[in-house]
Image: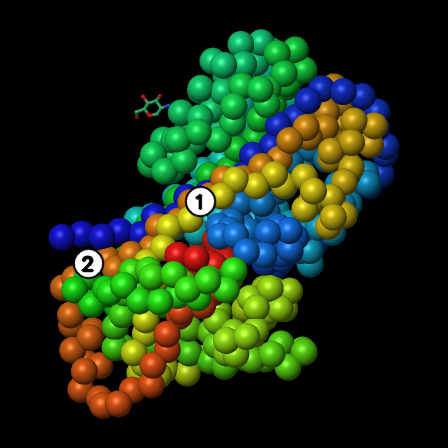
Amino acid sequence: MKHLCFFCLYALVILHGLECVLPQTPSYGERGSDLGIQVFQQLVRSKPLENVVFSPHGVASILGMLLPGAHGETRKQIISGLRYKKNGPYKMLKKLHKTLTAKSNQDAVLIANAIFSQQGFPMEESFVNTNKDNFRTETRSLDFSKPQVAANEINEWVNNKTKGHIPSLINPEMLDATLTRLVAVNSIYFKGLWKSRFQPMNTKMRPFTGGDGNVYSVPMMSQLSVFNICMATTPQGLKYKVIELPYHGNTISMLIVLPSDEDTPLSRVIPHISTATVQSWTKMMRLRKVHLVIPKFTADAEVDLKASLSALGITDIFSEDKADFRHLSAEPLHVSKALQKAKIVVNEDGTKAAAATTAILLARSSPPWVTVDRPFLFLIRHNPTGTILFMGQINQP
Ligand SMILES: *[C@@H]1O[C@H](CO)[C@@H](O)[C@H](O)[C@H]1NC(C)=O
């Protein structure tokens, strides 16, 4: 019997032809980007009670793809939005891409990038080459004058790259038969088996108090095991627990964030989360034997990125007048739409290795209980690089 965890995700941007420009010289920065987490915070602010699943890395990737085409203020906004320091963003994104797609990760993480451009649309060679070098971006030409056919082709690519988990990303109405020039797509697929698996027979219906205050009966998995755990505090003094659930292979973990006080809404803790916060947990983590109870859950979400990115200062890419992608093509372009769809399924997973792990834990007595029976936050981190591949909030599993 085999249970798998799937995470799919991607981001997309559609560029339309238009006009207007500004000059300026480029500058760079680097290190793990915080932008995706900031976007997540923007998103959940407007939906504090919904389930949200999102890929921070997908947002950074799509902007990383556009960056070599950008100039002047447009470029500056992307770079400062990505919050990279030192050495140039490509170097960092390229290194990340290389690490994330390394042989040892290939079973778990599949990242793919593509640029679909209008037949005959002349792109700058350096833009295409930079994308190929940094992200192995493939370029394909399409005929956007047939929006349905073009959308089908893009969706089929996404469906292939996400192994069927995101069957459709764009609809034909998002494409303009005469103005669409380019669609950039990033896809991330992740499959991980828990290092310490849950036994299906231990999954029971248990109460979970939703973000809306109602109590729901949901399937809760449980296991007695040793996990990395820490207690952290927000600057406002709110305490929360962090529990790390490693996946098989040990390079990727899910981190569960649970406010310690039942009355503390998740929304009071989320603004405190950043790559620096996540990094700080690593130092505080201690292995502890606990009886972990956590819901099985699935979630999917579609998010329009325009409002969030704009709120974070990345505005010019969306402006017909201000967008400056002169290094992408001679024809002025701007971003008409930026969106992301994501999906997550979490369950018990395989059984034999779980039995082995659980056996060790059973040797100890009266371990404390950690019951995730209230809204919680999750993050899926590639540990060696600190990249947050996915994050989400679960208000009702
Ligand atoms: C999707 O995968 C199938 C089977 O490998 C392939 O024939 C098809 O060309 C792929 N589609 C796209 C759009 O890449």
Q: Nearer the viewer, residue 127 or 356?
A: 356
For the C terminus, the image quarter is bottom left
Q: Is residue 101 left or right of residue 18?
A: left
Q: Nearer the viewer, residue 344 or 92?
A: 344
Type of the residue with mark 2: Gly
**Residue 35 x, y percent position in the rendering:** 64, 53
At x 52% / y 33%, what residue is drawn?
185
Q: Give residue 79's mark.
A: none
Q: CA distance from mark 1 to mark 2?
A: 23 Å
Q: Give residue 350's mark.
A: 2
Mark 1 or mark 2: which comes first in sequence? 1
**Residue 109 x, y percent position in the rendering:** 38, 48
Residue density around tag 2, few if under 14, some if 14–19, many if 20 or more, within 10 Å:
many
At x 19% / y 61%, what residue is drawn?
200
At x 13% / y 52%, what residue is drawn?
1
Examine the image and state in which quarter residue 252 appears: bottom left
Q: Is residue 83 visible?
A: yes
Examine the image and state in which quarter residue 354 appears: bottom left
State the SS at label 1: strand
State the SS at label 2: loop
Q: Is residue 246 left or right of residue 332?
A: left
Question: Vertically, is 299 above or below 320?
Answer: below
Q: Is residue 95 visible?
A: no
Whether disc 1's CB lies below 8 Å from ligand 1 is answered no
Question: Vertically, is 60 above or below 278?
Answer: above
Question: Vertically, is 7 above or below 353?
Answer: above
Q: Nearer the viewer, residue 138 or 158?
A: 158
Question: Vertically, is 185 above or below 56?
Answer: above
Mark nearer the viewer, 1 or 2 = 1
Q: Which residue is mark 1?
A: 300
